[in-house]
Amino acid sequence: MSIAAIILAAGASRRLGQPKQLVIHHGETLLARTLRITQSTIGGPVVVVLGASAGQIRSAIDFSNAQIVDNPHWEQGIASSIQAGLNFIEENESAAAPTEGVLILTCDQPHLTEEHLANLLKEFLMQSGPQQESIIAVSAYAGVVGTPAIFPRSLFANLNALVGDEGARSLLRNPTCRIIQIELPGGELDIDLQDDLQHLE
C-alpha cells in the first residue's frame, strides 16, 4: 500500500512570537526533526505545507527530499493546509498505485519518535487493505486522540470537506470507521506559547 505524509507547517505562531517551525531543540529545528523522522519511516512521498514565514523556513531547512506546497490561504485555518497537501498528493499520484492512506502530522510535537510513526504505520498496514475494513491509526495522549494519524483513502473526501480551523481531529470525534490507538508519551506537549518553549527547554 502506498502511504503519503503531510506535515502541516504553515501557521504564523503568533502566540509564540516566533516561527515554531524554526525553534531549535537538541540542535535541530522542530520542522527539520519532524521531516527527518517522517522520511525515515514513511516509504511514500512527504509533503510539507508552508505558509507564514515560508521564505525564512525554506532558507533554513533542507527540503531536497521532500515536496513543498505553498498554501496561499494559510490564514483561513488548518483545514486549508490539509487540503493543499492532499490535493498535491492526489494530483501527483500514480494511477497504477494510488495513495491508500495519508499520515497527517504537525511540526511541533517534540516527543514524536521514529518508533511511534513506525507503530502507527504497522497497525494501519496490518489492518487495512482491499479485503479489510477501513481504519484510522491515531496517536493517543493525555486522554485524547489526535495527530499524528493515518487516514484511509475512503476519508479523503471528509478531509477535503473540513473548513477553517477544523483540523483532522474533528473526524475522530464521530468516526465513520474503526480507530486504532497508539500511545504517544508526551504527545500532548506542542509548542504554542512561550511557556511551552520554556517547559521543553
Image: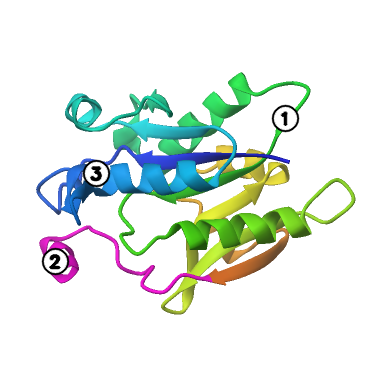
Whether the magenta-drawn stretch holds residue 98 is answered as: no
**How would you rate the neighbour count of disc 2 (Cα within 10 Å): few for under 14, some for 14-19, many for 20 or more?**
few
Query: Is 191 covered by the magenta stretch?
Result: yes
Q: Nearer the viewer, residue 133 or 127?
A: 127
Evaluate if marks 2 and 1 touch, with contact meaning CB atoms under 8 Å apart: no
Residue identified by numbered label 1: 98
Is 107 positioned to the left or the right of 14 in the image? right
> In percent of the image, x 40 and y 34: which residue is there?
48
* The N terminus lies in quadrant: top right
- Residue at horizontal 12 percent and vertical 67 percent from the top: 195
Q: Residue at x 72, y 30 (%)?
A: 98
Image location of residue 198, percent across then percent down: 11, 67
State the SS at label 3: helix
Q: Give the label, 2 or 1, closer to the camera.
A: 2
Q: Which region of the structure is painted magenta?
A: 183-201
Residue 58 location (% of width, % of height): 25, 26
Q: Amino acid at mark 3?
A: Gln
Q: What's the distance in space between the residues labelled 2 and 3, CA to CA?
A: 16 Å
Q: Which residue is mark 3?
A: 21
